Image (cartoon, grey):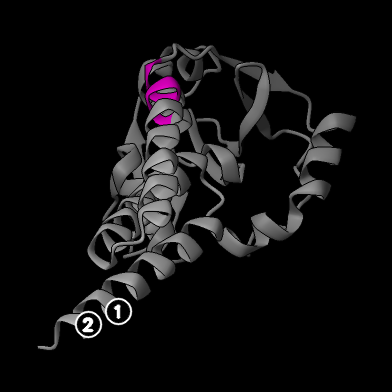
Amino acid sequence: MDTYLVYEIIGYVASVLIAVSLMMSAIIRLRIINMIGAATFCLYGILIGAIPVAAMNGFIVLINIYYLSKMLGDKEYFRLLRVSPESEYLKSFLSFYQDEIKKFQPDFDMKPGAEDICIFVLRDMVPGGLVIGSPDNSGILNIKLDFVIPNYRDFKISKYLFNERCDFLKEQGLTKLVARAVSKDHRAYLEKAGFRKSGQGADQFEMDL
């Protein structure tokens, strides 16, 4: 293959990676892809003898490494907060994120029931996640909504709620969580969060507390 063509392909790959990173809402993923794209551009600059291009993108790589190490190394503060289904803040939160919610859980009707359990997951005091479910008399919570805001979709919130703080869920009188996956991505999320298929259908998942 012609050397110039190889260099051109490397440049195009770098451009695509940078463009893809800017379309991502999850900050950590954005920085990782952006760092790979900048490193590829740095290589491209070296190969074609464009030192300013290589130097600038090398600097961008270092910036991404710095912020990634800071984000992954800093200890974050998590807290669970149960709110009333009639909470004005809850209504405002659902209204603000309704388009994002409909994207991932289109069957949620945006109206919590009067007996529903509504739990915010605060991450550094920012309401990063929200779980709404309908409990029955046997201690089963049928999850109607499990939503995380775009910047925090790195599974830390689900790990904290479903694994590290399952005691909080037990304190609400719950013994089992049941969720229905409406898409392939949602199924993958539930499995990664620790849910298992319930045997009641391909879209039914559960977790014992």
Residue 115 placement: quadrant: top right
Residue at position x 51%, y 45% from top? 26
On screen, 136 above or below 197? above
Looking at this view, is 140 or 147 the one in front?
A: 147
- State left or right for residue 184 relative to residue 43: right
Crowd rating for badge 2 (residues with CA inside 10 Å; few <14, some 14–19, many 20+):
few
Residue at position x 55%, y 61% from top? 23
Q: Tell me the magenta residue range.
A: 68-73
Residue receiving disc 1: 8
Question: Main SS of the magenta segment?
Answer: helix
In the orientation shown, which residue stands out farthest toward the bottom?
A: 1
On the question of residue 46 being in view, the answer is: yes
On screen, 72 above or below 100? above
Q: In what quadrant of the picture does the C terminus appear? A: top left
Look at the numbered disc 1 and give the secondary structure of its residue: helix
Residue receiving disc 2: 4
Tag count: 2
The percent coordinates of residue 176 (x first, y second) are 40, 32
Look at the numbered disc 2 and give the secondary structure of its residue: helix
The percent coordinates of residue 152 (x first, y second) are 53, 37
